[in-house]
């Protein structure tokens, strides 16, 4: 059953606009504000953050990590009693905790929501994690419109921690692949490396993670030297070795920590 409360959406970037669109399509009454982007069809456009949140039972802050705290501060005086604030920005756990502290000082429950996949193609059904004050209520409300929200038993910042830990792995891997392919292109070997990477992905299984971690610690010294050579090669190819040099530094640190 759909809930009837007004939902405010702050920020109409790629994620915010898609979430607002899907809320409207699911029957929600949506108000919103973005100083640079017009409101999607069906969303009542306000002239400020405070104007958007006035009378709303749920606020989704989807502007940016830099705007997360100012948006809450600008809205405090306009929030209705009992309104829940949900921050969906990709911000650090410290920012989420600061939001929760501000909310606690003003009797506003703040929920930390982490979107765990790209929003395009999924919209409101993007997998989300929620933690902090009001997480259960926020999740129930959003589920009423078809959202996919898992509630974590913990404070604001826990959902962000999980998302960013995943980002270190996934975005780091992606950046390394991009750098490697850029160097391969400069060396005239892009097709070969592309095929090689695809083959490596295809043969991974449940033992891969343990093999990577164990091998890194066992062979840190040799691999550090190898990545130093790789960084030198990339430099010679005219490619800045950002990820290769970072890999060298990590292997050297691991080697230094070994007993």
Image: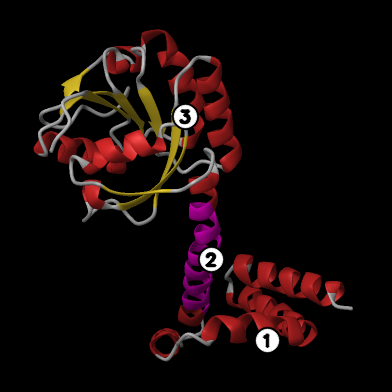
Residue 114 pos. (x, y %)? 42, 47
Most frequent secondary structure within the magenta stretch = helix
Pointer 3 residue: 68
Image point 46% across, 28% down: which residue?
Answer: 67
Q: Which mark is residue 215?
A: 1
Q: Are marks 1 and 2 in contact (CB under 8 Å)?
A: no
Does label 2 or label 3 sit earlier along the sequence? 3
- Is 242 situated above or below 190? above
Q: Position of residue 90 (x, y in %)?
A: 46, 43
- Give the SS element for disc 2: helix
Q: Would you say the residues marked 2 and 3 are in contact, meaning their CB atoms lie under 8 Å apart? A: no
| Structural distance between the alpha carbons of marks 1 and 3 | 41 Å
Distance between the Cα atoms at labels 1 and 2? 17 Å
What's the image's color scheme?
A: secondary structure
Q: What segment carries the magenta color?
A: 162-183
Q: Measure the alpha-carbon separation of dots 2 and 3.
A: 25 Å
Would you say 125 lies left or right of 137 here?
left
Q: Residue shown at 64%/79% (left/top)?
A: 213
Pointer 1 and pointer 3: residues touching (CB < 8 Å)?
A: no
Nearer the observer, 207 or 109: 109
Instruction: Residue 169: give its label.
Output: 2
Rendering quarter of residue 214: bottom right
- Where does the C terminus fall, quadrant-wise? bottom right
Q: Position of residue 210 (x, y in %)?
A: 60, 83
The answer to which of 243 and 24 lies nearer the viewer is 24
Query: Residue placed at 85% from the left, 77% from the top?
Result: 258
Seen from the viewer's position, the closer of residues 256 and 178 is 256
- Residue 169, magenta (yes or no): yes
Residue 130 inside the magenta-drawn segment: no
**Number of numbered callouts drawn:** 3
On screen, residue 33 above or below 259: above
């Amino acid at each position: 059953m759909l809930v009837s409360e007004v939902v405010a959406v702050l920020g109409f970037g790629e994620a915010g606009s898609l979430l607002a669109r899907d809320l409207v399509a699911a029957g929600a009454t949506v108000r919103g504000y973005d100083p640079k982007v017009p409101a999607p069809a069906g969303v009542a456009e306000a002239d400020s953050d405070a104007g958007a949140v006035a009378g709303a039972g749920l606020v989704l802050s989807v502007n940016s990590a830099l705007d997360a705290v100012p948006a809450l501060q600008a809205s405090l005086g306009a929030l209705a009693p009992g309104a829940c604030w949900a921050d969906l920005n990709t911000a650090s756990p410290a920012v989420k905790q600061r939001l929760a502290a501000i909310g606690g000082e003003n009797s506003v429950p703040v929920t930390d929501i982490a979107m765990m996949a790209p929003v395009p193609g999924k919209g409101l059904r993007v997998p989300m994690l929620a933690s902090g004050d009001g997480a259960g209520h926020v999740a129930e409300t959003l589920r009423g419109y078809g959202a996919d929200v898992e509630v974590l038993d913990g404070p604001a910042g826990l959902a962000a921690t999980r998302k960013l830990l995943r980002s270190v792995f996934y975005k780091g891997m992606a950046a390394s692949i991009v750098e490697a392919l850029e160097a391969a292109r400069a060396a005239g070997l892009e097709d070969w490396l592309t095929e090689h990477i695809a083959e490596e992905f295809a043969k991974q299984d449940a033992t891969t993670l343990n093999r990577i971690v164990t091998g890194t610690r066992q062979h840190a010294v040799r691999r550090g030297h190898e990545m130093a050579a790789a960084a030198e090669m990339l430099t010679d190819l005219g490619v800045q070795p950002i990820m290769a040099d970072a890999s060298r530094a990590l292997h050297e640190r691991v080697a230094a920590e070994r007993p």
